[in-house]
Each structure stands twice: as C-alpha cells, then as structure tokens.
Amino acid sequence: MARDVYGRRRDNRHRSRSRPPSRSGVGGEGGTAGGIHPNAGAQAIVASLPVPPGATKAQVARGERVFLGQEGGGTCEGCHGSNAKGTPLAPDLTSGKWLWGDGSLAAITRTIADGVPNPKNYRSAMPPMGGAELSHADLKAVAAYVWALGHQKVH
C-alpha cells in the first residue's frame, strides 16, 4: 500500500471518480492524455528546417505560426493543409516541386504576394496574400517557412 507525503496510507482503489481525471497531466482542463501538448514536437520540427539565404530561424518559426493562422491572420493551412502537404484546393508545399517559380525565396514571396489567379492544376485561385492582410514582415516569414518546407533534405 502506498503512503502519501505525510505517511498516511493511500488506497487509490476507492478514490472517487465523480469527475474525470485531468488530461493535461498538470491538473488543468483540456490537453491530451499523459500531459503531452498536441503540438509537442512542432518546435523541434521547425528548428530542424533549413533556413533560406537572407532569412533567420526566427522568421521560419514565425512563418509556421502565420501559415497555421496562429499569428498575423494567415489563412494558408485552409487550402494547403495544416501539414502543407496539399489538398484538392492547393498544392503540396513540401515536395520541392514549384508550379509558379524556381523555388527561390524571391519567387515564393512573389507568388504569395501576387496570388495565383489562374491555377494550373487546382480548382481554386489563390488571392494575393492568401486573402489575408499580411504585414510585410509576416509575408517574409511565411515565405521563409514555405521555402524551408520545400527545401528539406527528405521529401
């Protein structure tokens, strides 16, 4: 039989279960089983991405948050998917295949800024800035993130 910090015997078999145990692992509401945050590991993934020439790791990290709509009002994941692997509406951005440029940071930035009014292989046009009011800094950040996704060693 286990004892608590005061030496009292503790028998968990008879503990009341009137409310479900916390799923956050730290006594709070929400979260996932075992206390693992649903985005655990995401920072490690972003940290492992390559950085385009002229950009910074911080821009790539912010670009991910803009892409996912967590900052700057970005709408990218709505068409490209939260994993950027594409949907019926928009292409995979992780494959290293570029439909609207040479894959350079400048070409990606231009495509995001100008949009894609007449897509080649997809049914939906991409409005300029993805339809969001991105700041210049957020445009540069999301372009750096998309560049990083498409220039990973393993596709």
Image (cartoon, rainbow, N blue to C red):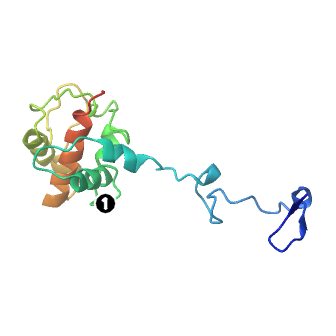
Instruction: Decide if residue 68 is on the left or right side of residue 9.
Output: left
Residue 18: give x, y in percent of width and height.
82, 63
Q: Which residue is mark 1?
A: 71
Q: Quadrant of the N terminus?
A: bottom right
Instruction: Decide if residue 112 is on the left or right side of residue 69.
Output: left
Instruction: Decide if residue 25 is on the left or right side of residue 126.
Output: right
- Compared to residue 93, the image places residue 131 above or below, namely below
Specify the quadrant of the image occupied by residue 81.
Answer: top left
Instruction: Decide if residue 138 is on the left or right side of residue 19.
Output: left
| In the foreground, 152 or 146 | 152
Tell me which residue sits at (17%, 53%) in the image. 139
Specify the quadrant of the image occupied by residue 135.
Answer: bottom left
Residue 138: give x, y in percent of width and height.
20, 57
Q: Secondary structure at mark 1?
A: loop
- Compared to residue 134, the image places residue 46 above or below, namely above
Tell me which residue sits at (23%, 52%) in the image. 57
| In the foreground, 8 or 19 | 8
Residue 113: give x, y in percent of width and height.
12, 48
Q: Which residue type carries mark 1?
A: Glu
Q: Quadrant of the C terminus?
A: top left
Tell me which residue sits at (82%, 68%) in the image. 4
Specify the quadrant of the image occupied by residue 28.
Answer: bottom right
Residue 153: give x, y in percent of width and height.
26, 29
Q: Residue furthest bottom?
A: 6
Q: How many marks?
A: 1
- Compared to residue 65, the image places residue 99 above or below, namely above
Mark 1 neighbour class, 10 Å CA radius: few under 14, some 14 to 19, many 20 or more:
some
